[in-house]
Image (cartoon, rainbow, N blue to C red):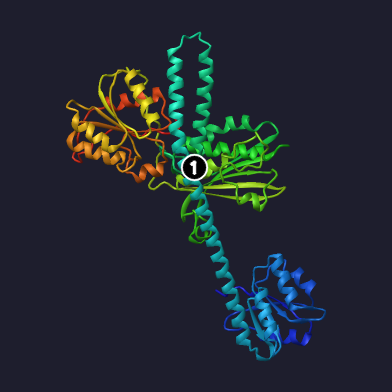
Amino acid sequence: MPMPAIRVLLVEDDEEDFLLTRKLLGPNEGTTFEVKWVTNCDAALRELATAYDACLVDYRLGADTGLTVIEGAIALGFRGPLILLTGRGDHDVDVRAMKAGAADYLVKDEITAQLMARVIRHSIERKEAEAALRRSEEQLRQAQKMEAIGSLAGGVAHDFNNLLSIILSYSELCAESLDAEDPMRADLAQISEAGMRAAGLTRQLLAFGHQQVLQTKILDLNEVFGKMAQMLRRLIGEDVELVVGEGAALRRIKADPGQVEQVIMNLVVNARDAMPRGGKLTVATTDVMLDEAYAAQHVGVTAGAHVLLAVSDTGTGMDRATLARIFEPYFTTKEIGKGTGLGLATVFGIVRQSGGSIGVDSKVGVGSTFNVYFPMAEGAVTILTEEPVNSERRSLFGSETILLVEDDPGVRAVVRTVLVKFGYIVLDAQSGGDALLLCEQHSGVIDLLLTDVVMPRLSGRQLAERLRLVRPEMKVLYMSGYTNDAVVRHGVLDSAIAFIQKPITPEPLIRKVREVLDLELSLGDSGVMPVAPPLSVRS
């Protein structure tokens, strides 16, 4: 298959030199050149606004010089190589041209057909390699920036979740101690409501850092969107036309259905807000195959079969500076009070944690398209349905002995208060070492170890493994305000391990404790006690 011709612009005010150059650039070693000739700087800059693979520039151009063309072309954003043509003895000019951005230079008296063709080809290859390197460096910088922001968000979430555990739990306990008519209950309800909103913001920060605890299922994206369509039409208003284009027989994806719904919701709301005077909002799904070349040029993308969710609007669009920051948390172009700046950051985190990727195409005054790629679920042929929930209300009170290990004194105190209120006997320790000593000194049965995951010197998982050697009958429930990444590093996140995400409030905590205690103790061949699956942070 013949290679496409290389388009070359020649900037030369001497017609004989043009004819010679065109002759030299005849068919050469299987390469074909298409040469366009202009005679001055202004014409050259107009031409370079279109597609050329390379540009040959004579140094002497009447009132201008080739350096003017080189500097002007680079300023206009021309990405191809600019090669200066000079006479013998113009070495200083050649050096100045290279400093100005020229890719190479040729001395006219020494040019041969092979030399000119080789210099052009090698200059193009060098430029392409430099462009690929710049893309890789930019992708690396972007990935490092997002990773750093995600780590910061996770650290903030940890401390914030501990504080919220204390605020929400004590406000609930205080409210329960008051008479129904007590006016203080309304004040406490305001505190609790504000705390829950803060907990929601924390979950969004965790989503951005793609560090949530997800409960994934095999999904059909069309079915997920279909259940939301009527609600979305009410949400966007009458002045926005919703157009749906669902691909037939989509591949299945593996994701948390609630999180996928949040992705769709946030993208639709973002599109609606970009069209204050109305417009058209298009949501489309289809199967796509991403190749290795595409994956290499886009950070976070893996090659293979994907399902595409595309959300397009005819709104205000975004410039390049806005696009560079669009997924950063708390970055927003909306007026103060009109948005938190977490909507698209949340989308970014959910998609990345689900193994997918997201990209944006936008033009000011035309609109934007968000393309979300979810990888196909391996071997997925059926859709899993929700398991029925047992609505029977069990008693939450108990008399078992619980070993509580938590390094934050405020959280430890409120958890102890809740457990004692519901009848449990509580032994509490502030570290893994203290817990080991307490366990050794306690002669009675310890029914449950309730431990924080991340603690100094000895993690919750390490502590549980040590205690299981001497108390194999003891059940374990982990709790953490850290992100999913921290939980994984400490060896906790597993579908066969009981886990509750902070911020902790009394009722969810006591229900989880009762749930784990009520499980039958049964050691299998692996020696691992089956316990409840991790609790989703969406609850």
Q: Is residue 355 visible?
A: yes
Task: Determine whether, in the image, residue 8 is placed left or right of residue 206.
Answer: right
| Residue at x-position 18% and y-position 25% | 444
- From the top left corner, tell me how far across and down residue 382 is, in percent: 40, 40
State the residue at coordinates (36%, 29%). 412
User: Horizontal and vertical percent for residue 325?
Assistant: 60, 49
**Horizontal relation, residue 427 to residue 268: left or right:** left
Q: Which quadrant holds residue 485?
A: top left
Nearer-the-camera pick, 190 or 512: 190
Viewer-side residue, 73 vs 302: 73
Q: Is 419 situated left or right of 166 in this image?
A: left
Answer above or below: position of 113 versus 154.
below
Q: Residues within 10 Å of mark 1 (few under 14, many from 20)?
A: many
Residue 148 as seen in the image, left or right of residue 119 = left
Residue that mark 1 sits on = 153
Q: Secondary structure at mark 1?
A: helix
Q: Quadrant of the C terminus?
A: top left
Is residue 251 something one can see in this rendering? Answer: no
At 57% across and 33% down in the image, what residue appears?
Answer: 229
User: Where is residue 22 shown, x and y percent of the image?
Assistant: 70, 83
